[in-house]
Image: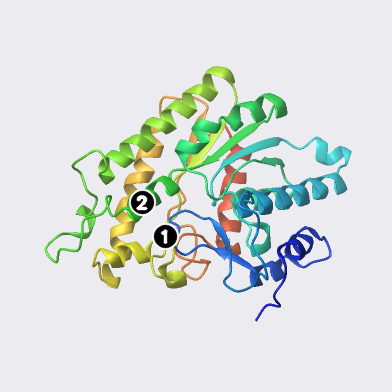
Amino acid sequence: MAKKLTFEKFLELARSRATPPSELRDYIEFDPHSPLPQLRFRSDVLLDQPPETFNLDDEIRQIGRAIDRERREQRKSLAFSELKGVVAEGDSWFDLPFFYNVYAIAEWIDWNERFRMENIADYGHTLERILKDHAYMRVIETEHPDFFIFSAGGNDLQIGLAKGKFIHDYDPNRPANEYLTTEGQESGAEGLREIGRQYQELLEEIHKAFATLPIICHGYDYPRSLNGEGQWIGQYLKKQGIPDRLMNPIVDSVLNQLNDVIKKATFSITTARFLDCRGKTGPSDWMDDMHPGNPGFSALATIFENAMNRYPDR
């Protein structure tokens, strides 16, 4: 059991470079009640309460970004400065809290040091939030990267799944590939159409402003619905009465449709490429039911690196 701390002492611990990042997991965790990756303090670890204005996700994000900047400063060299630059925007498949010791795709690319990485992804961001913030346009303008890589849409699906709107309740007579709801503004089919529309908007905006910038997207690998007690996906399927044996087939079907939507959005953009990452991670490579572990994310990072190295080939 973690030693109880005051809030100020926790901040000192979190910000200390002498503290092993893994120790922070004794005090903070992903909130199991949030459909999106969002941090919270573990119960009964603080002696007092943080200020109402304190945002744990912002604090951990800022510490992680500072660590990244320090690492980049330490390895600056002429050879490193001549590497091709990448701006990465997206969600938890590009960015995870630094204390987890699991590196997402963009983080692995950064660590591999075959490209210069500017990673502005945020593990809790939806595609809708990314479009609203428009940070990618400002960073591309500043960094003049050789590539823009993008990962989004999964968190948008998570919201619909958590609401119980995107997937039909269990019906023993319904085929696994027909569980996506199709009627109404909050249906799964409408959710996918909106993801496609937003992807198209983002890709066209970037292409219009930066006509020669290569853009590389993906549509995730198949989730493991029961891993990690089903914190992200499994718990919501259980609420809809779906038995364990059908969870992966149902989610695989939805994931296939998401891949189709994202792939289609890239067709009209000459500089955009779609990477099919389905089936590219092993069955034991996963941290939980929504995120691969280091072996899986490392393998996916290599797929992105290879795609950038062979661009403009499709």
The residue singled out by tag 1 in the image is 223
Which residue in the protein does label 2 denote? 255
Compared to residue 210, the image places residue 132 above or below, namely below
Amino acid type indicated by mark 2: Leu
Foreground: 221 or 121? Answer: 121
The quarter of the rendered structure image containing the N terminus is bottom right
Disc 2 secondary structure class: helix
Label located before the other in sequence (2 or 1): 1
Given residues 314 and 278, the one toward you in this image is: 278
Q: Position of residue 154 (x, y in %)?
A: 43, 48
Percent across and percent down for residue 240 are 25, 63
Please tell me how crowded label 1 is: few (under 14), some (14-19), or many (20+) other residues with Cα within 10 Å: many
**Which residue sits at x=75%, y=49%?**
68
Q: Residue at x 53, y 47 (%)?
A: 91
Q: In the figure, 106 relative to 236: above or below?
A: above
Q: Is there CB contact under 8 Å for labels 2 and 1?
A: yes
Residue 127 seen: yes
**Quick one: SS at disc 1?**
loop
